[in-house]
Image: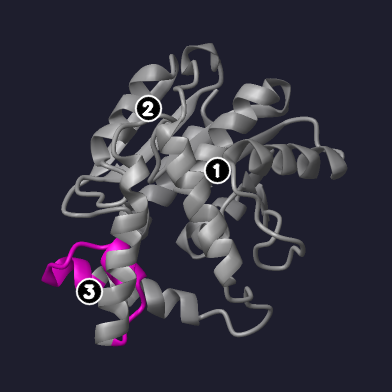
Amino acid sequence: MTTTWTDTRTKSVGADGVASAHHVIAFDNRGVGGTGSKVPTDIDQMAADAIAFIRALGLTKVDLFGFSLGGAVAQVVTLRAPELIRRIVLTGTGPRGGGGIDKMAGIVGGAYLKAALTRQDARNFLFFPRTPEGKQAAADYFDRLAERRVDRDRKISLQARLAQLRAIVAGGRAAPDDLSVITQPALVANGDNDVMVASEHSVELADRIPDARVIIYPRSGHGGIFQYHREFVPEVLEFLGAP
């Protein structure tokens, strides 16, 4: 079974582990990584691009993995083209219309300011708690990213950052989707203290999808699946391999 990643930031989380049993395609959406053009400013267009990509490859059924904004895109892909999707893994994400998601601009802006003042990557503040355990998890995460020496992703452009932020804010303010029509099994995961997408939104997401289960990792945040990658990858493999 082919597993399609809708967010390339999760390539280092466990693509190799999942690829031990599945054909993994790490998908760069429009304007990101190796794909040209400009990033759309709405989730629906991102989902349309993902659907077109899957169909262009001639794939008729895939497992879909989405992290953060990619998780929002994966939900819309499943709603718009359910015939293409077998199972979905949604991480660090919540449902469209979730309260508080539209505050993302202030959260991200504050993190980038802290990053500039401390000369650190903003993901230190967005993905991991500022505890000794969280800081060590962040350091380990960046060490894993650095292991890849060739064919590395291009740095995300300013246009892409702003467009993605607009899409997230718009999604937070949008009318909720009817997730009860999703019949595919879903695995939802997050940390217990996500400053970007409140952890309770992930729980709500799982509650609204009929065949879903949720994992909330302790003492972690938006990057909970990075911090607990050794536990997360076996969970994904078990989920994808379940009858």
Helix, strand, or loop for circle 3?
Answer: helix
Q: Name the residue beneath numbered marker 3.
A: 136
User: Mark 3 touching mark 1, by CB under 8 A?
Assistant: no
Amino acid type at image mark 2? Leu
- Tell me the kind of residue under disc 1: Phe
Label 2 to label 1: alpha-carbon separation: 15 Å
Q: How is the image coloured?
A: one colour
Within 10 Å of disc 1 (Cα), the crowding (few <14, some 14-19, many 20+) is many
Residue lying at 26% horizontally and 63% vertically, measured from the top left: 128
Residue corresponding to mark 2: 205
Range of the magenta residues?
Answer: 119-136
Q: Tell me if label 3 and label 2 are in contact, CB under 8 Å.
A: no
* Residue 121 magenta-highlighted: yes
Residues under labels 3 and 1: Cα distance? 26 Å
Tell me which numbered mark, 2 or 1, is placed earlier along the sequence: 1
Which residue bears the numbered disc 1?
65
Q: Considering only order in the chain, which callout, 1 or 3, is on the residue closer to the N terminus?
A: 1
Q: Is residue 196 above or below residue 153?
A: above
The answer to whether residue 2 of the structure is visible from this angle is no
Q: Amino acid at mark 3?
A: Gln
Viewer-proximal residue, 153 or 31? Answer: 31
Q: Is residue 26 visible?
A: yes
User: Quadrant location of residue 230?
Assistant: bottom left
* Image location of residue 25, percent across then percent down: 69, 53
The answer to the question of whether label 2 and label 1 lie on touching residues, with beta carbons closer than 8 A, is no
Q: Is residue 147 left or right of residue 157?
A: left
Residue 193 on image: x %, y %: 20, 49
> In the current view of this chain or complex, which residue is farthest to the left?
131
